[in-house]
Amino acid sequence: MDKLLQNPVKISIYFVFIIGSLLLAYLTYANLDKGFIFNDEAYYLSYYKNKGESLSFDRTNFFRIFRFLYTPNVYHFRIISITTLVLSNFLLCFSVFKYLNLKNNIFILSFLGILIGFESWAISNLIIHQYIGNTILVNTGVSLILISLITKRQIIQILAGFILSFVLFNGNSHSIVIAPIFAFIILCDLKRWKTNIIWFLTGLISGIIIYFSFLDTLDNFIDQLRFLKDYLGFHRKQHSKTFMVLWCVYLFLNGILPSAIAFFLLWRSKFSENSIKIFDKVLAVIGIITVGLFIFSNPWYIFSFIVFTHLLAVRFCTDKTESKRNKYLIILILIIPYCLAFGSQTWFHIRLSVYKYYYFLLIFICLIRLYRNILSISGYLLALSVMIITFPDVLKTKGWKDFVFTEQTEKVKINGYDLYLDKQRKKDIEDLRPYLQNQPNVIYSSNHLIGYLYILDANPPIYYYFPLKDYMHYIIKKLGKTPDDYIYIESNDYPFSPKEFVPLKFVNHPEHYKVVKAGRFTLYLPPNFKKIKTNVRNSWNYN
């Protein structure tokens, strides 16, 4: 490795890592007061606002665990969230490099975590939710485990177990990540694995006790799981067992099967020097293809990226000069994204975009430990350079967040604090304010409207992605209300689906409802809707 990381290669690595981190940090922080994601971001922020008092179909409690970091100032909360995330990335990089006993300046090399952290989230949805939350918890927990193993201070395992215990509640399906971490603790130190596990479990149990003592109640947690069962009964199509089976099959075909075949062929050849050379050539070809697809923004690059990372991990694990404990760490880093993406009802290659940090870390380790040529590192730095150079495009493209940063010029008050939105969204808010401000009972047509409810302090019976007639009947009855107690809102872009939900057919007395147009929106107002004058502004309410 020392031969590889000589000038100018070492300087190039340091330059890309540091300059890339600083540039992406500047662009991110300079734009965190602009824009608002009206579906996902508003959805997650609503948990913090209602403190879990509203019904929820999600198996997550991130808003309880990270409440100590929360502030109603969205701009400040974004700063806190992304800073905590990239620092946890940095900590994991630093502890991993220290564990592997890298001889170069690991502090500077750890800027890789900061760089990828900013790039992965692309200034979007940067508030602590279950995905960012679990990344922070896992990064911190694994780092503490590695520090414990490095320093041989087993008591640190208590703190690691304590932090990782909250993964059990932050996103229940993601809690499977505890299993490979548990296995790593055992395998990496067979002489002291029993005491390591005892210390770790002590911390884990302590965290569980703290959670149910101060953050939540056991009864509420059980009710959450019961309600989830009811929710799934109405959403079989959206949360099908078939999807999860296909999710696992796809992952098996894209990553696990190629790795298994490669390992089998190497094993069959008894890991001979010739077979390793051939395998290295195959890896080089796949690596070149991956970088090429990435540079030209071909969507197929992600599949090549997954295969390449898995095969590189196989190459590392078959290397005769690497210790078993180093190989176990590589396997753990490879597995973590599987666990964090599991159960999210999103294909792995799509969800991987926010977990690719682990792959970039793994690839970097393998390249500097296994190979002694400039080309391998050059390809890696080229990919990072492309990511850095193209990052400013985020400011000019709408993307899934549904807004353009350069158009966010209008000051709007959200939770009493300034945030900049575009002119159309500001107009939408003022159009809806007379009808939705502080309204307790609102049913919306699409999750893309949640942001308006959040900004205007209006509340639905439950937060959802789209309304289903039978499901909404069930929720309304559960709350002891009737359909006629609610305001119904749809937009021109996101109307109610005629096949799923028609407001005037859903209510008991449609003849009593008043249909109102407000800018791009249509509202169905109940008969007891009244205009109420307040000392702040003219607003509307109903008894």
Image: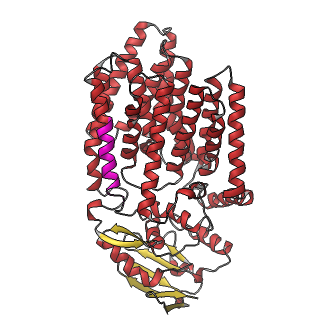
Q: Which residues are magenta?
A: 17-32
Question: Looking at the figure, which quarter contains the N terminus?
Answer: top left
Q: What residue appears at the point 34 percent right and 74 percent down from the top-left corner?
A: 426
Number of numbered discs: 0
Instruction: State whether residue 526 is above or below residue 62.
Output: below
**Image point (66%, 21%), residue name:** 190
Task: Report the coloring of the rendering.
Answer: secondary structure
- Using residue 151 as the reference point, say whether residue 34 is left or right of it: left
Q: Nearer the viewer, residue 292 or 419?
A: 419
28 falls in the magenta region: yes
Q: Residue 390 appears in which quarter of the rendering?
A: top left
* Residue 36 part of the magenta segment: no
Whether residue 264 is visible, yes or no, is yes
Q: Looking at the picture, how far across and down is residue 120, in whole percent?
A: 39, 45
Q: Please identify the quarter of the rendering in which residue 202 is found.
A: top right
In this rendering, would 149 be left or right of 489? right
Quadrant location, the C terminus: bottom right
Q: Main secondary structure of the magenta part?
A: helix
Q: Residue furthest right?
A: 219
Q: Is residue 289 above or below residue 471?
A: above
* Residue drawn at x 47%, y 15% as measured from the top left: 319
> Residue 23's quadrant in the figure?
top left
Horizontal and vertical percent position of residue 502: 50, 76
Q: Does 486 appear above or below 300?
A: below
Which residue is nearer to you in this view: 339 or 489? 339
x and y percent of residue 142 in the render? 56, 36
From this view, report whether residue 413 is shown above or below residue 311: below
Q: Position of residue 238 (x, y in %)?
A: 54, 55
Q: Is residue 298 visible?
A: no
